[in-house]
Image (cartoon, rainbow, N blue to C red):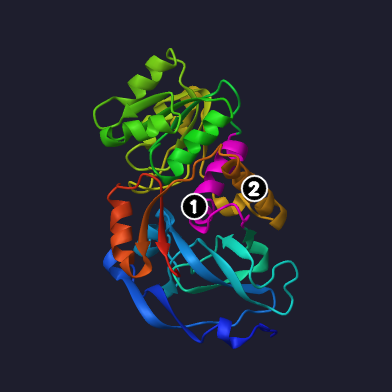
């Protein structure tokens, strides 16, 4: 097997990383200081991480909702600098600023297939780049591909002041939609600042009633629901005839099994997409990431890094996210 061809000073033999050795609550996150650094395989790059992004999918991996073989290095998203490349890498070089969406980002170094490397433009800070990967690409494919939003559509977005939600609100408005979003009372102003036309406090207001009042009993064309267990019923009930419900997360827990007959009275559509299926080819990954970075560079999309934790404070980061405190992207600083 061909391996890397870069001088050892750039690539130490051991590193700090966060491991999960048994599934469970945040206390199962182990910050370890003596984890092996792998030399790159033929078509791999080693990225020295400046930031690792925190996403809800990380909590699903940690808890076992989305099982992974134990033990494993946590994280699915990072941004930093390439410090080693494999013998068959063609389009990436040492020193490149990059981001990626592969497992193992809660670490000083991550081995990333060349096909998964995302070039980061020089005018995009690396912490913002980390926020453009899972959350940015997710918001992009949901609004541009899963249900392509068009001018005049009515869109309901749950948790519109959170990390992915606030990007969904912005994309939907950029595409010309009328946007309704739900949030808690303390985040109403944040959701409005993202451009939402109507903000519903889901603790004190009836979501379906408010949606039907705003849309003159028509309902919305699409619901983007990353909350799951506590919102799925209101999502389906808020849709218009032949509307689409897009489940993409489980922030409150997984959606229970749904009988297809529930969809029948309004001939509804239901889908549960994944980011990996919307970045299948290298061309699709580069086109989608380039589009997101372009929105950011033009000032059309505000990717807000709301909270930064040191990597060794990983337990506190997960608790913060699961407590619903996030108002934007949360990142872990790995290297200065």
Q: Give the quarter of the image for residue 107.
A: bottom left
Q: Which mark, by number, is residue 288?
A: 2
In x, y percent, where is residue 297?
Answer: 59, 44
> Residue 296: within the magenta?
no
Position of 140 with respect to 87 (left or right) is left
The span shown in magenta is 120-147
Q: Nearer the viewer, residue 69 or 279?
A: 279
Q: Is the magenta stretch mostly helix, strand or loop?
A: helix
> Residue 132: within the magenta?
yes
Position of 336 with respect to 319 (left or right) is right
Position of 91 with respect to 221 (left or right) is right
Q: Which residue lies furthest to the left in this view?
A: 204
Which type of secondary structure does the marked residue at label 1 adopt? helix
In x, y percent, where is residue 335?
Answer: 45, 70
Q: In this view, does 330 lie above or below 112?
A: above
Q: Which mark, by number, is residue 131?
A: 1
Q: Give the quarter of the image for residue 198.
A: top left
């Amino acid at each position: 097997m061909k391996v890397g061809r870069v001088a050892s000073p750039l690539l130490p033999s051991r590193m700090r990383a966060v491991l999960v050795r048994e599934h469970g609550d945040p206390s199962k996150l182990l910050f370890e200081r003596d984890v092996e650094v792998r030399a790159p395989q033929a078509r791999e790059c080693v990225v020295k991480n400046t930031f690792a992004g925190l996403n809800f999918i990380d909590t699903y991996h940690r808890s076992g909702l989305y099982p992974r073989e134990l033990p494993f290095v946590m994280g699915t998203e990072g941004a930093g600098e390439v410090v080693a490349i494999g013998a068959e890498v063609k389009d990436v070089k040492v020193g490149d600023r990059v981001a990626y969406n592969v497992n193992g980002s809660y670490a000083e170094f991550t081995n990333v297939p060349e096909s998964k490397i995302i070039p980061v433009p020089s005018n995009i800070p690396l912490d913002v780049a980390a926020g453009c990967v899972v959350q940015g690409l997710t918001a992009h494919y949901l609004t541009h591909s899963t249900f392509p939003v068009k001018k005049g559509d009515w869109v309901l977005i749950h948790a519109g002041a959170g990390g992915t939600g606030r990007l969904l609100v912005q994309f939907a408005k950029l595409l010309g939609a009328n946007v309704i979003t739900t949030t808690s009372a303390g985040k109403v102003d944040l959701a409005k600042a993202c451009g939402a036309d109507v903000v519903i406090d889901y603790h004190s207001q009836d979501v379906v009633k408010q949606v039907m009042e705003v849309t003159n009993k028509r309902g919305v064309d699409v619901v983007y629901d990353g909350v799951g267990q506590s919102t799925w019923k209101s999502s389906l009930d808020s849709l218009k005839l032949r509307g689409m419900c897009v489940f993409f997360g489980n922030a409150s827990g997984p959606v229970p099994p749904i009988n297809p007959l529930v969809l029948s009275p309004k001939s509804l559509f239901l889908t549960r997409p994944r980011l990996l299926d919307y970045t299948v080819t290298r061309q699709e990954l580069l086109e989608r990431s380039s589009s997101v970075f372009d929105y950011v560079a033009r000032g059309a999309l505000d990717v807000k890094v709301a909270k930064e934790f040191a990597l060794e404070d990983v337990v506190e980061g997960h608790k913060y996210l699961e407590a619903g405190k996030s108002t934007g992207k949360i990142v872990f600083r790995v290297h200065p």
